[in-house]
Image: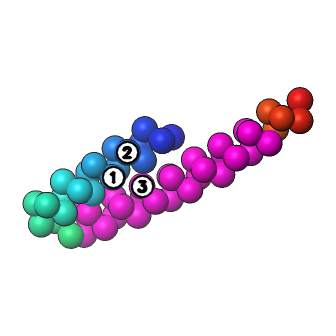
Amino acid sequence: MLRWTIIFIIIAIIAGVLGFGGIAGGAAGIAKILFFIFIILFIISLIRGRKV
């Protein structure tokens, strides 16, 4: 999941440099959502791993 976040951030940066603001904003939004999902799943896996 973190890999997809990095891919979308790179797409957003490239689109921003080339002047495609809408695409850059969309890719950055997707990257932000994926990053927060990754963080939540990571924290859940840490908590569950310690209890076992």
What's drawn in magenta, residue-wise?
A: 22-47
Check contact, mark 3 vs mark 2: CB within 8 A.
Answer: yes
Q: Is residue 45 above or below residue 5?
A: above
Question: On the image, numbered disc 1 is attached to which residue?
Answer: 9
Q: Is residue 25 above or below residue 48?
A: below
Residue 26 x, y percent position in the rendering:
34, 64
Secondary structure of the residue carrying numbered label 1: helix
The residue at which mark 3 appears reads as 31
Disc with the residue nearer the chain's start (1 vs 3): 1
- Give the quadrant of residue 27: bottom left
Dot 1 crowding, Cα within 10 Å, few <14, some 14–19, many 20+: many
10 Å crowding of disc 2: few (<14), some (14-19), many (20+)? some
Query: Outermost residue, right direction?
Result: 51
Residue 41 located within the stretch drawn in magenta = yes
The residue located at (19%, 58%) in the rendering is 15
Image location of residue 30, percent across then percent down: 42, 58
Give the Cα separation between the discs numbered 1 and 2: 5 Å
Return the x and y of residue 13 as percentages of the image width and height. 23, 56
Q: Main secondary structure of the magenta part?
A: helix
User: What mark, if any, has residue 6 been given in the picture?
Assistant: 2
Q: Residue at left 57%, top 47%?
A: 38
Q: Would you say 19 lies left or right of 9 here?
A: left
How many marks can you see?
A: 3
- Whether tag 1 and tag 3 are in contact, CB under 8 A, the answer is yes
Q: What residue type is labelled 1?
A: Ile
